[in-house]
Image: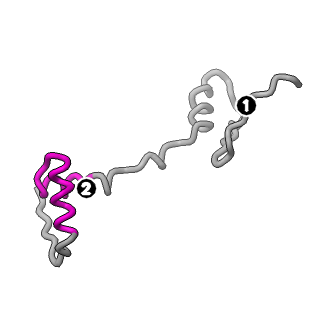
Amino acid sequence: MAQLIVRNLETDVKARLKRRAEKHGRSMEEEARHILREAVKPKGGSRAGLGSRIARHFRRAGLTEDVVEFRGYPARPARFDK
């Protein structure tokens, strides 16, 4: 396993890391490893949108049209009066 040395860490940062480690029941070293793992963990943002996943799922059933993705739009109730 690799080692990482952090120099010139501010005293207050070290103290907060120590408190955080104690809160989570870990050593400071394990808490730092946890923070680093979380910081570089792949985000879910690279996942295909819902419309793309639906289209891919139903492509075998003959769906050939694009499914529009409405990212950033508020949800609206369905209307059945037309």
Judge whether 3 appears above or below 67 on screen.
below
Q: Amino acid at mark 1?
A: Pro
Expressed as whole percent of the image width and height from the top left, the position of residue 6 reads 16, 71
Residue 40: mark in rendering: none
Q: Residue at x 22, y 52 (%)?
A: 34
**Which residue lies under the disc numbered 1?**
77
Task: Give the extent of the magenta segment.
Answer: 13-37
Q: Local crowd at mark 2 within 10 Å, few (<14), some, or many (≥20)? A: few
Residue occupied by mark 2: 35
Where does residue 53 sit, x and y in percent of width and height?
56, 34
Residue 61 in magenta?
A: no
First along the sequence among labels 2 and 1 = 2
Q: Amino acid at mark 2?
A: Ile
Q: Residue 46, how many percent across, how many down?
A: 47, 48
Which residue extends farthest bottom?
Answer: 8
Q: Nearer the viewer, residue 22 or 45?
A: 22
Q: Residues within 10 Å of mark 1 (few under 14, many from 20)?
A: few
Q: Quadrant of the C terminus?
A: top right
Image quarter of residue 35: bottom left
Q: Nearer the viewer, residue 1 or 76?
A: 76
Helix, strand or loop at label 1? It is: loop
Residue 15 highlighted magenta (yes or no): yes
Mark 2: secondary structure: helix
Residue shown at the point (60%, 38%) measured from the top left: 52
To which quarter of the image does residue 39 belong? bottom left
